[in-house]
Every structure is written in C-alpha cells, then in structure tokens.
Image (cartoon, coloured by chain):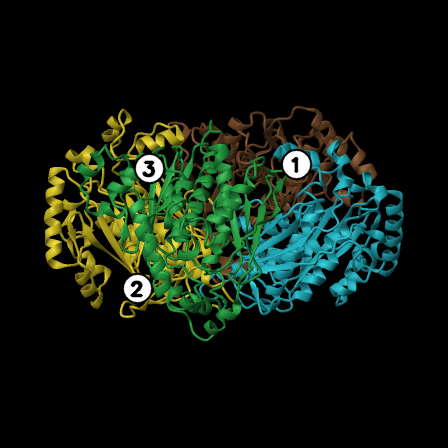
Chain colours: A yellow, B green, C cyan, D brown
Amino acid sequence: MSASSFGQRLVITTFGESHGPALGVVIDGCPARVPFDLPLLHRELARRRPGGVTATGDSITSARLEGDEPEILSGVYEGLCLGTPIAMLVRNQDARSQDYAAIAKQPRTGHADDVWRAKFGHSDPRGGGRSSGRETVARVMAGAVAQMILRQLVPGLRVLGFARQIGPLRLSDAEVEALSQQDLSVADIDAFAARMPQRERSVEVAQLLVEAKQAGRSYGGLVELWLCGVPPSLGQPVFHKLKADLAQAMLSVGATSSVELGDGADVKGAEGSVFHRDEARPERYGGIRGGISTGERIVLRVACKPTASVLDVARTGRHDPCIVPRAIPVLEAMAYLVLADHVLWRRTDGMNIK
Amino acid sequence: MSASSFGQRLVITTFGESHGPALGVVIDGCPARVPFDLPLLHRELARRRPGGVTATGDSITSARLEGDEPEILSGVYEGLCLGTPIAMLVRNQDARSQDYAAIAKQPRTGHADDVWRAKFGHSDPRGGGRSSGRETVARVMAGAVAQMILRQLVPGLRVLGFARQIGPLRLSDAEVEALSQQDLSVADIDAFAARMPQRERSVEVAQLLVEAKQAGRSYGGLVELWLCGVPPSLGQPVFHKLKADLAQAMLSVGATSSVELGDGADVKGAEGSVFHRDEARPERYGGIRGGISTGERIVLRVACKPTASVLDVARTGRHDPCIVPRAIPVLEAMAYLVLADHVLWRRTDGMNIK
Amino acid sequence: MSASSFGQRLVITTFGESHGPALGVVIDGCPARVPFDLPLLHRELARRRPGGVTATGDSITSARLEGDEPEILSGVYEGLCLGTPIAMLVRNQDARSQDYAAIAKQPRTGHADDVWRAKFGHSDPRGGGRSSGRETVARVMAGAVAQMILRQLVPGLRVLGFARQIGPLRLSDAEVEALSQQDLSVADIDAFAARMPQRERSVEVAQLLVEAKQAGRSYGGLVELWLCGVPPSLGQPVFHKLKADLAQAMLSVGATSSVELGDGADVKGAEGSVFHRDEARPERYGGIRGGISTGERIVLRVACKPTASVLDVARTGRHDPCIVPRAIPVLEAMAYLVLADHVLWRRTDGMNIK
Amino acid sequence: MSASSFGQRLVITTFGESHGPALGVVIDGCPARVPFDLPLLHRELARRRPGGVTATGDSITSARLEGDEPEILSGVYEGLCLGTPIAMLVRNQDARSQDYAAIAKQPRTGHADDVWRAKFGHSDPRGGGRSSGRETVARVMAGAVAQMILRQLVPGLRVLGFARQIGPLRLSDAEVEALSQQDLSVADIDAFAARMPQRERSVEVAQLLVEAKQAGRSYGGLVELWLCGVPPSLGQPVFHKLKADLAQAMLSVGATSSVELGDGADVKGAEGSVFHRDEARPERYGGIRGGISTGERIVLRVACKPTASVLDVARTGRHDPCIVPRAIPVLEAMAYLVLADHVLWRRTDGMNIK
C-alpha cells in the first residue's frame, strides 16, 4: 500500500503539490455502470472552494482563487463508470509562487514546511508542497465518486457535517438535539455562515470571523458529522473496525487533532450501569458497536486547530480565519470514502450477501 | 490487505476467538537478527493479564484466569529473529463456555454479540467471539516484538501509558505536568493501583474500583500515552500521517471512543496567534506537525467506555470494573507497532537514509 | 502486504520453517457460513505427503515421515466458518536436525541455504528454513479452504493436475487430447504412479523413479493443470489479470522454472491468421483473453527443476527423485487460491453482481 | 491493493483507456532526491512508440501516430523527485474512434472486447478500452522512473531485452551465447530491425515483417530479457520470490502466454546430477535460487501471441505484424519496476542494511 492511497476495496491514490502543475486522484474499485454525476462533482468542489457557497461569501475564507475545474481523464464513458480506474485532476491556477519566496528562507510558524524538508531533504518552498490543505481537493473529488456509488447501493445514506464550535462560539447539546429533530439537508447547512446551522449563532460567527480576518486572528473549531442511513453490519473485525477506519480518515486530514465517536471523550467519566442502560440515548454508542455499524445514526466529532497561515500571510488576505467551514466538505468526503469502502467490503462477508 | 492485518512494513495478522482453542499473531517484516527477548514478551503479557502486576492485585480486575503462556511457532532461532514470519499463540485455558450458554438466547447489553451475529449470520454465543477484549492478547504479543525491533533501531524510544482519568477521578494538568518532570518508567507506573501514578489519587481509585466490583458498577476512563524519544521524520504524506495511523491503531481497540493528539479537542476553542506562538508549550502540537514526527514527545489521549460485562456477569466476578488499567499495555502495544512500522518505512524515504 | 501473504480478497499468510516447531497459515476473507470440510483438508494433506496415496507408494517419494495432523486454531465453530481468520498449523515431527549438522559447514548444491543465509545474515542450517519445500504444507491447507469456498460459490469448478512429463517420459498431445475426452477425477489421477494418468507411461515412470531413487538420480518434469468450470469474467484489468496472478502463484512455488498458458511458448512460432482462426482449438488462448476468464477450460503448464536433495542426502532415502507428483497438489492449491480470490473480487465488479 | 496497482514498496497505479482522453500513472514510494531524467523518459517512450527507432522504421509497426508527449503533474521539483507521488500522463491524440464504430456491432477475433464487455456490462467499443496494448504506455513511464531510482541505488544494473524469435526465425543457443560475450547496449539492440541483434537474422526478419504487413499476416515471438548487475539477496520468502514477482509482471502484459526463468521449460527433461553440477552453466538457475537473486545474470524468456488486430484492421495499416519489437521496452519496464521494488524492500530485511 502506498502512502498516498486509502481504502481496501475502493482504493484511491492522490497526487499533487500545492504549487505544482496539478492535483488529482485515481479511484480504483468503482463498480461498472455507476452513473457518473458530473454536477455533483462540481457542487462538492464548489463547497470546498474558498469564497464558495456560504451566505457571507469570501469575507470569511481565503481570497485565493481556485477555479478547480475538474478534468476526467479515464474510467467514464457516456455518463457511466467503466469499472476501470477513474482519474481526475484540477490544475493549479493561482499559485503565486512568488509570495512564497520569503518562505524559502524562514519556516512558517505552525506550518510543516520545516518538518517536511527535514524528512525529504528537499527545498520546495512553495506553500508546504503536499502538506498544504490544497491537497484536500483530491479527496473531495474522490468523495464525490464514493457518494455516486453509495447512491446506487444504499439509497438514503447521506453524510451531514456542520460547525459544532468555532472558537468561543458553540452549539449546545440542546441546540444540536433540536437540529436532529429537523430534516436538515446539506443545502440547509450551507445556507448558514460558516456552516453553523443555527440563526443567532450563525450571525455571531460571521461577525467573529470577519473581524478575525481583518485583525489577522484565527480560531480552532469542532466539526460534527452525522452519517445517516448507514446500513448495519459495516465494519470488519479487529483492525478495520468502522470506527478505526473513520478515525484514520479524519486524522489524515491536516489541522485535525482529535476524533470522537458518539459520547466520545465524555465516556471517561461515565458509570456503566447508567451509560449502557440509557436506552433513551441510543447514540451514546455513536452508531457503532464492536466496531460494526448498528444501523443507527453514526455521530463523529473532529477538532481542528486554528489555522497558522494567519500569522504569516495575513496581510495578503489569503488565509482562512477558521478552517472548519471548508474542512466540512473534506471530512464528509472522507466519511463517504470509508462508507463506500465498507459497503463494497461487505459483499464478501458471507455466503448470501449481495 | 486483510481485515485482521495491521501495518504497512511491519505487518501483523491476528487470529483467534475468545473461547476457541487459541489466539495468536503472525508478524511479518521483522528484520533478521533482531534479538528475541522472551522475558520482555512474558512481561508484557503479564501486564495485560487480569490480576496482574498492580499493587492491589486481582480485586480490581476480572477473575478470569489466563495463563497466557506464549508459544513461539516460527521465525526465531537461537535467540535471533530469522527475517521470516514470527508466529506466536496462547491457548485459551479457562473459557467456561457454559457460563455463556444463557447468552445464546439473549444478547448482552452493551456487547457486540448481536451485531456480529447479524453481520456474519452465525451462532457462536461464546463471549463475543472475536469482538471480545481477549483478542488483544495477540496485539500485546505483536507489540512486544515491535518493542524489540525499536530497541535495536531507536535506542531510547519508549512508550509510557497511564490512567489519566477513571470515572470521577482525574489527574489535573498540574499533576500531569509534575509527572512529566520525573523520569517515570513503566515499572513506576505499574506500581500504582490502576496505573494512575499519583499517590493520593491512586488510593482513591483503588477504593472506587474495589467498591465498584462488589456493587456491580463499572467506569469509563481516559488513557494518556507518552511516546518518548521518537525520532523526527516519521510519518508519510497524506493518508499515512503518523497521527492518522495512531488514530486507527487506538480506535481499533474495543471500548475506545475517542483519540486526541496534543491539545486534542481543546484546540476547538483556541485562538491562533495564542496557540501557535505559545512556545513554552511545544507539546500543543502533540509532537507531530504536518503528519510527521518532530522529535518532540508525542502525547495521545484515548477514552474508554465503561465495561458492559458488569451488567451481565457481575455476580461471577469475571469482569473488570474499569478497563483502563488493562487497556494501557494494549494501547502501548499498538503505539509500538505504529512506530516500528514507520521506522522501517522511513528507510525508503530518501537516497541517503539508513 | 507482507512477503508471506498472498491474495487480495482471500488473503493467506503462511509461517514456519522446515525444522522449527510448526508450519501454518492464517486465512482471512473466507465468507461466514462456508461449511468447513475437515475430511477434505485431511485428504489434501495426504495427497501432498511423502509416501502418500500413489499406487506404488513411498518408493518414489521421500522417506521423511510427516504426520501433518492439522490443528484448527480459530475461525471455525460447529462445522461452519465464522467469517473470522482461520488459523491452522501442523507440527514438525520428524525433523532430524542432526542430519543437517553437516550442512552448517557447506552449502548444498542447488539448494538455497547459502543464498538465504547471505540475505538474512543468519545461521539456521536446518534444511533451508523457509526455502524448503516443507513450506508448501501451509499452502495445501489454505488451498483446501479455498476449495471449500468455491464449492459453495461455483459448484462444478475443479482443478485437475497431472504429470505431463517426468524426465524423458512425456504424454504426447494426442494422449492428452484423449484424456480430455474422459471425465477424469482427482482420484483417477492419484491412482496412477507419479500421477501420470496413462497406463503404459505410468508403468515406465514408476520404474524410472524407483531406479532413480536407488541410484541417487533425480528428474525434472512438467505439471499440467486444468481449471474446469471456471466462470467467465474472473480477472481484473492490467496487473491482476487472471493469468498474471496464476503466474505469480505458480512461480512462487520452489523448484518451478516456467509457466505457460494455453499454447504457451508454442505461440512464438505461430502465424496469426492460422492461430486466431483455429476455432477447432478454443484452448489455444488457454481459457483467458484480455486477462479475463472466458468460461472455457483454463490450461496451465508448469516446469519443475530436478530435485537437488538427491545430490546430498541420497543415501538417507530422504529425497524425492522427482518433485512433480508431490508438486501437483501444491500447484492445485495455488490455483484454487487464485480462483477463490477472483471469485470474491468479482463481487464488487459491478452494480448487479452477486 | 487495487487492480491497477503494482509493487509493494515502489507502488504504481495506472489509468486510462485506449481511446479516452489520456493514459497515465501515479508512482508512489520513489525516494526523495532521485534525479529526474526527463530525456530518459522521452527515450523510453520513443522506444515503445510505433514507427520508432528501429532501422527499418514504421514499415514493421503500426501506423498509428502516438506523440506520447509526457506531462509531469506532480512529485518533481527542479529536477529532483520530492518523495511525493509522481503523476504523469500522455494524451491520446490519434484515436480515430470512428474506425471502431464497426466493432460495436461485432467483437474482433482474438481481442478481448467481448470478454471485457461481458465482465463490466458496458458498451465502450473503442479499441478494447483498457485491454488495449495502448495501456502499456503508462508502464513505460513508470519503468523509466524505476530505472532512475536504480541508477542511483545500484549503478551498473541494466535490463536488456531482445527478440529471441519472431515467427519462424529464431536465434540459436550458439548465437545467443555469442551475443552474451559482447558488451551489448540497448542502443546496439535498437539498431537492428525488430530488435533481433544478429545481422543475417535481422535482415530476414525485416523482410518477413514487411511482407506480413502487406499481406495482413502476423507472427508470435519470444522476448529474451537479461537482467545484468542485479545485486544478490533481492526477493522475499515464499510469495514474493523474485521469480514470482517477475512472472506476475511479465504475464500482466497483454499478448504474453508464457514466462521462463533460466533453463525454463527445458528443465522438465533434465536429470539432476547433470543439471545441478553443470557449473559451466551458472545460468541454468536463471540467476535466482530459493526465490532470491544470486548476483548472477537473470535470464527470462516471454512468449507473445501473434497480434490479432491483423485480422480486422489490416487494410488500415494500423497494426503490428509482430508485437515483439514493441513489447521489448514494455517488458524491460516491468523488469525495472520489479527490481526497484525489491531493492527498496531489501532495505528492511535486516539490522545492518542500508
């Protein structure tokens, strides 16, 4: 298995440096005759893009222009997946390598430039090369294909991510419980600033981030992911428990520093006869038991560090004051990839499984 | 890659059900001529065993007797690893399948019996089969070999785990900071009840668990792991970032529900110019930047759910009131496996690397 | 992937040295509820064993006693596979390491002792360690499980191997054509000396090998394998073409030096308009086109070198004058493993595939 | 592992259909700071191209125009490999899909169109999609990078392929023995028609193929590969013996039908005391013993079927009357990939290995 590959049945291999010619992905293992939904691919890329689809626009994200026009190189013919590898790329259009000339001399605080240079002994000063968040564009392309597969094999399955916390602003348990009573869609969430889907909080967040951007501040945050409509029996014994693969997927994304399932870290103070018998809260297990999906909703929370770019290039306007809004489609993509992988893996679990 | 395999360069494959004839592991990729340290293997197995080495003895762990005498089947000759697969097993001695006859009729709350039966369509009622914590004995054997490899390749590297929290009892940041000033060894930690290495807290924990065992209660908890002496440049781009592989490793263990690196989930409220510039706290990044080890200490925290067995078999005395003390050597083993894997992987990173 | 693992969906990992405590295999990916056929396992082990089931008995094989009593360690419960890893081993009973004391001083011609020692820098003089043909006992155990899977998923599929040539004695094309008109079974072939299923030739072969054994001679030979009842559409694009995986499987066995598919090396002199239009001979393609099975019979031929042991330990009677008879169940096992792997892989090829 | 990936340490993943937008490869595991030799890449692509570098020019190859201008998308910066995935592609320029309209209705004899369509249930009529020989352009790009790596790590290693036989014309053992006394280079071989490096035979071959092309005939043939300067100790136990990986590599190429190592299929008639003691012929083992390289020259022979295109598109001039000349750089590329993979794998064999 290569360092840039992910998955066991649906295997993706990504490539590309932040300031090289292109970034892309090869997806192998997509079943033949899955309809290829090009608008879905565009939509997901747009959701990740700076200055994308949030209500308050680019004032709360990086000003870097990324056209991200995807080019399909193989694996698709007349709107259907061929069963052969699907290769896709986007070109880097607005690299402005010159901005990074200064970096060559001095590593940027909080960035990984120096760590990577020490590892590989090279001298690419351009935006962190492959440690840059730009790398995630390939994940989003791959996640869109995973989503296309799942639509065919598990209609009704969907992944919803939202900002649970941004810096000091947090949705309470009661507010989240209220959200879960609604039939939220991705579009609903995208309509809120910074993807925090609660009216008052969203207004506060927009204000916080606009000011942060002007003042050169940045904030950490917490993404919450709901994996809805996941069929039971996904996950494999021991090392490829569904929770283990989700954890790897989430923490493979830059800037993340923790992942929790269900009650997550809160279980550390729990008493067993209360915890296990609290049948009013089926989600205390997070939708996974023994490493295997139960058919209940899977709940994940992923913490993100404050962006470091703010310290260095704040004056250029080319940074995000909080990465959470743009991390959401990336983490959703990783969840789709894990789910599609395990849905395909499930096909060989037993004698009578389709 | 199989579901029961872990690692890319040092590849382990485990097998065995909780109440079948034996559990074991095949380890492939161990370099030839690593000295095989049999006492180390025994010591690590003893540390995981119920009623093992803690000061207060078996009163705070399951009464299940597990001799866990390891048998080396291959890969070792005259005290040296041969470069061929190392296969090891332990027999199941005290399975008492009859205790589990009742389970066949009714799934146990909080256990995965029903989930696994639904997945595989089988009828093994015996203690959860491969979802049982008994499976971890194979991980501990493998982790001991990883430790033997690392001793040769990275002298000074060691992994220290301790109980950061057990139910309501928690070591404060200041207490942990004090610990980190000492030169703690594994033996030091093992000398404390429940492996919480602080005198007062340890006494309280012993009392809490003894009472819990008698009353049929159980507690969740939090394990903290320090990976000391890790060389820089471990970890691979994108999907095999060191943090991603550690996350998969930790969440592949049953009963775990979250993993945090460095400041972990606390970063969600952080402001960037404070967080990144706090040079007095190099560990805010957890010893990993851009997915690559920096040479600093790596700090992980893993939450464990309260054991569920307490609800069902409490009267037999065959359960642990908190899994944290026994989870520690298992999580340490997983950390050793990830580190050994990446130390070997590092050998092919560049032209001039040994 | 580890060096001792094989397969992508049905993944086996073998272990064990020729003169260590045991040899065995872990099989991961076997679907749950496949009936475990223990007599089949015993039968296949017996077919590989020296002095096994051929009509003329041990006079044409090594005198080494190998009880090869398989022990099932995991993955099977009440006669059904559990969906968890199946681990099996056989103990080494008649190792006679003392016979090999001399080898420590001087490498044996044609053996790999010196090559392996140079590679791993170790000093195990005992029968070549893991390069010994004894290693194949693990493959036969794994192959038996593959056969159990295929019986459920592709009834009617079977692999038939026979000795096409032993030293100077060879079945002609006409003789083989005659064989293919019969409805040969494995038992039919095993009834002939050295598994050359033609009465006159079989008598000659028996005489040749008895004399060779007495005189300390050995012969090379050619195994022909028929894979009958293979469904169409097995094989994957590009690197996992069915022929590529079969070639790796066959040449991973010691003593083999070539593999041919269909008309094999004879195609080198063929003219295309004759070759491709010869519809009376569908097997000129060997049952595989574009790397994918066509549904026709797959024909493979594998050449084996003369055994080298004859040169060194001839006087002890512990060698095979020709490895072909005993290689047949091993090569059949490898073919079953490749087929089971691809039958499972096939399940994720497309939308509508069970 | 995906179907379109190859290798364990140097992992390549190819993509692209014969008549889609592009074909390419992602190479992961190339050590950082390997000099990227662009002219070498161009040279190898030119050697594979129809109408390439042979003395008699395009009259003996397909008239299809393939510019094959490689585009480097990632992994290279200022002439050095970065240690990140190297992605490269070539565009399809001269696809002439319209030529293939007729194919949609009727499968082409000897081609795999129908087999692939049955497998994947799709309808791409365009030249066999991914089963086309056009796919090999990605292998040649990858092989060139493998060659760049080996130049750094094992100076002096080189792979030489030549046409041992084309239809009825064959180099005798004595002629090949004479060749091996010379210090042949790739350029020397390329100077001969059809890469058969013997003056008289080369003239005959040129005549044979020119006539075949005019008459719509095609021939099978035999490629011989010499792997010179291979260090000892390459190859891994059991399933990744060097010969096993080479066999998979060779038979993963379309049109191949057999692979032989050293004396290959000829060993089937050999007597052991003669074969093993023939020290004047060290290459009877083919440079590999026990699956591990010995340091001697490795000799492989690969048979190729007559091209089938001749039957269908002969009038358009777009076919090769014998695939052997163009298969040579492809098979060389596969050999370089296997060797580079094992040279990197070797780094983790033991304690003291660089």
* Dot 1: chain letter: C
- Left or right: where D284 falls relative to D162: right
* Residue at 10%, 48% in the rendered image: A207
In the image, residue C138 sits, relative to residue D188, either above or below, namely below
Q: How far apart are the two marked residues, 2 and 1, measured between alpha carbons?
A: 56 Å
Q: Is residue A318 visible?
A: no
Amino acid type, callout 2: Phe
Amino acid type, callout 1: Trp
Q: Which residue is mark 3?
A: B287
Q: Position of residue A32 (x, y in %)?
A: 45, 60
Q: Which residue is mark 1?
A: C116
Q: Are marks 1 and 3 on the same chain?
A: no
* Dot 3: chain letter: B
| In front: label 1 or label 3 | 3
Amino acid type, callout 3: Gly
* Residue at 65%, 57% in the rendered image: C141
Q: Are marks 2 and 3 on the same chain?
A: no
Q: How far apart are the two marked residues, 1 and 3, measured between alpha carbons?
A: 40 Å
Q: How far apart are the two marked residues, 2 and 3, measured between alpha carbons?
A: 33 Å
* Residue nearest the observer in this picture, A354 or B182: B182
The disc at residue A275 is 2
> In the current view of this chain or complex, which residue is farthest to the bottom?
B105
